[in-house]
Image: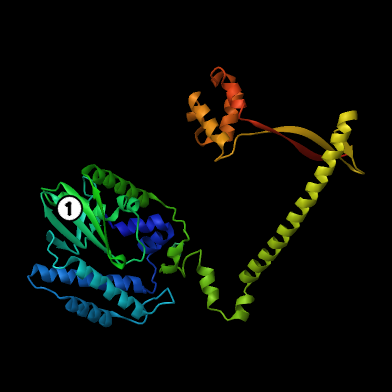
Amino acid sequence: MSTFSISRIGTYRDCPRQYKFAYIERPQVEFRDTVEAFLGSRVHEALEKLYRDKRHEKELSLDGLLEDFNKAWSENWAEKILIVRKDYTAENYRLMGERFLSDYYRRYAPFEEGRVIGLETRETVPLDDEGVYRLHVRIDRLVDMGEGLYEVHDYKTSSGLPGQEKLDQDVQLAAYSLWVRRRFKDFRRVRLVWHYLAFDKELDSWRTDEDLEKLRRELLKQIRTIEETTDFPPVVSILCEWCLYRSLCPMWRHEAETERLPENEYLSQPAVKLVDEYVRQKAAFDVFRREAEEKLGKLEQALIALCSQELQNEKVSVVVGSENRVTVKEVEQVKWPAKSTEGRDRLTAALKDLGLWDRVADLDPHALTRILKDETGLPSGGRDILESFLEKEKTYRLTVSKKS
Ligand code: SF4
C-alpha cells in the first residue's frame, strides 16, 4: 500500500531531484526549520486551540489567544531557525503572527458559523477501489453547514495572495474533500475556504462531485507516474533557497563546497580555474564572432553588388580570387505575415474559410508552405488566396569552393 501526501506529489512536480532526496535516498541532512514554517505552525496551533476551547464551551479572549501564541513562540524558538530574508528579524515575524491572529479574531468572533466537526484532522482516503493508493488528509478546520454542505478551511500565513483562477484549480483542499465526501453520507457540496491571514482575507472555491471524481483519477495517475519513473532531474527555482538538500544537489554542490574555502584556495581550485578560463575564452570568441560576422556581411554585400552590376550585361555569377572562386546565386525566400499584424489576422480568416485551419495550427510556416506545394489538397482558388499573403524576398547564397 502507498500513502502519499499532497505535499509529496507537489515536491515531485516542483523538483523530481528533491523528491528523490526526500522520499527515496533520505540522506542525513541537518533539518533547519524556516521562520516562515515556524510562524505558520504557531498560528495554526493558536487557532486550533481557539476552536477547541469553543467546542468545550470555553470562550478564549483575544488577549488569551495572543498569550497562548507568544508563550508557544518563546518556548519553541531556537537560534538555528533559518531566516532567509536578512532584512527581517524573528521579532518582525512574531509581530506578524500577532497581527494575523488579532485581525482574524476581530473578523470572526464569536466563531459560531456552522458546526466544527474536525480540527487538524489526521486521516487517509483511498484513491482506488482496491485501497492500494491512499492520500493523507490534514484539514485545519472542517465545518458542517447543514443540508449536505461542508466547508474545508485552511489558514495561510504566506505573503502572496492567489487569484481566483488558481484557487479554482487548487488540488490540496479539493483532495481533502475526497475524504469528506466518503465520510459523510449526506454530503452534497463542498466549499473550500482559505484564510489569507496576512491580508485579512477569506477566499473560496466550490467543487462538484464530478470535479472531485476527476481529481481522484488525476491524483491516481500522478502517483503511478511517480512510482514508475526512474528519472529525477533537478529543477532549479526560487525553491532551491529553502531546499534541505541544496548542499548535496548536483546543481549547487560545487558552489556550496567552494563557498567555505578562503579566497586563495578557492581561486586555485582546478574546477574554478577551468570555469574562469572557459568563460574568458567564450567571451573572447563571442567578440571575435561578432566582428567576423560584421566583416563577412560587408564582403558579401560587396560581392553581391559586383555580380548584380555584371549580371545585367555579361551574366557573371562566379567571381574568382587567387585560389578560390565564389558563386553568387540568387534565391527567392517566401515569408508569411508576422504575428500580431493585420495581414496575419486576414490570413487566419482566409484559412478558416478554405477549411485549412486544422492543418496549420499556430500558423506554422512550414505547414503552410507544404499545403501550397500539395496541389491536390487545396480547394479551388485556394492557391491564389494563399499566395496573396506571401511576401517574396530575394536573398543570395554564397558558397566557396577551391579552384580546380
Ligand atoms: S536545490 Fe533546487 S534543484 Fe536541487 S534538489 Fe533542491 S530544489 Fe531541486
Number of on-image labels:
1
- Seen in the image, is 90 located left or right of residue 311? left
Residue shown at 33%/58% (left/top)?
8
Q: Is residue 328 left or right of residue 250?
A: right
Which quadrant of the structure image shows residue 392?
A: top right
83 with respect to 367 (left or right): left
User: Quadrant holding ligand 1?
Assistant: bottom left
Q: Quadrant of the C terminus?
A: top right
Closer-to-camera residue (189/250): 189
Q: How is the image coloured?
A: rainbow
**Relative horizontal placement of residue 278, taking residue 310 as reference (left or right):** left
User: Which residue is rendered at x = 37% and y = 61% of the image?
Assistant: 24
Residue at (89, 33) in percent of width and height: 310
Q: Residue 137: horizontal and vertical position, in percent?
A: 22, 58
Asked if the residue at label 1 sits under 8 Å from ligand 1, the reply is: no
Q: Amino acid at mark 1?
A: Val
Q: Is residue 296 above or below residue 376?
A: below
On the image, the x and y values in percent for residue 237 come to: 46, 61
- Residue 158 x, y percent position in the rendering: 34, 66
Q: Is residue 377 above or below residue 4?
A: above
Is residue 59 depicted above or below 393 in this figure?
below
Residue 171, position as x, y percentages in the image? 30, 52
SS of the residue at dot 1?
helix
Which residue of the protein is positioned furthest toward the left in this rendering? 57
> Depth check: 84 or 20 in front?
84
* Mark 1 lies on residue: 180
Q: Is residue 62 visible?
A: yes
Q: Is residue 401 among what the camera can see?
A: no
